[in-house]
Amino acid sequence: MGFTITYQKLLTLRCWHPEFLRSVANLVPIAPATPLTLTERNDYLAYDVRRWLEIRPTEAGLAMLRRSGLIWTPSTLGGWLLANTTYVEADPSVRLQLGVYVRDPDFAAATNFGVSTVAGRLFHLTNANAGVVPEYDLTGGNLRDVHYAGSQNFSVTLPQLAPGTDSQVQVRDPLVSGNPVLRTVSVAGSAPDPAVYSVDLSGLPAGLYRFTGLHIDNINLLVGFTGDPALLGVIDLRLADWSGAACDLNFQSF
């Protein structure tokens, strides 16, 4: 006896770039009933972000999909997170983590990333701390400095405010209310470098972490994403309460 599994669009990600949207750059997102000229309709149908970007789950994102039985499907506008119609997520810490990778150099050449340099940094976008709405603009307009975080490997270095002082550093989740502590690390002030603390985050998944302590400047850092020059940024999409919503990533041209 056969059976059918029905899926719902749990979340939709849409990526917009005016250079490639052409005549519809100022019209998106476009409602189904919106009247378009022939040129506008052709430009909209020809738009396929997959030509320029690859948006795919990170290792942490893939692990979440496996645990939850969800499916990420790329689309011409970005992608969909699909779930069984019976799926309900109540845990605010559950997120789909996506990496945004350049596929075509023409995209980078045509894009104003909103900062003077992206060296050592990646953009990070999320709906985790936002009020729930049917359509949410992840960039709040366009990418700019506030959307970027420093990127380090799993051996994080943090400048000491009181050089040579032993201390403790709290590693927190900045995407959950209250920024709960995930790990407390005792750090030596004198070794291996008396100017910085070294914090080993091996065993934690790559992601955005907040570092707090008495002898450091509190800071958010993206950890574990170094080594891939095609990676532009990371998106963390909270699932709880956001079922059926669309999230928009807006790029800008020069």
Image (tube, helix red, strand yellow):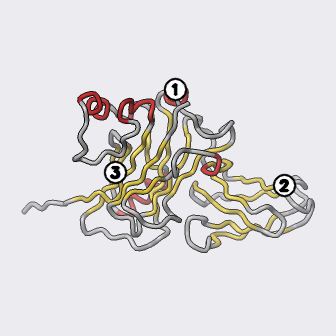
Residue shown at 79% from the left, 61% from the top: 217
Mark with earlier residue (3, 1): 3
Say above or below: 65 vs 29. Answer: below
Q: Is residue 71 left or right of residue 152?
A: left
- Secondary structure type for disc 1: helix
Q: Quadrant of the C terminus?
A: top right
Amino acid identity at mark 1: Pro
Q: Earlier in the sequence, mark 3 or mark 2?
A: 3
How many angstroms separate mark 3 from mark 2 (CA)? 42 Å
The kind of residue tagged 3 is: Trp
Alpha-carbon span between mark 2 and mark 1: 36 Å
Apparent side of residue 186 relative to residue 55 in the rendered image (left or right): right
Cβ atoms at labels 2 and 1 below 8 Å apart: no
Name the mark nearer the viewer: 3 or 2.
3
Q: Is residue 230 above or below residue 248?
A: above
Q: Are marks 3 and 2 in contact (CB under 8 Å)?
A: no
Q: Tell me the kind of residue under disc 2.
A: Val
**Residue at image coords 53%, 49%:** 234
- The residue under label 3 is 80
Q: Which residue is mark 2?
A: 196
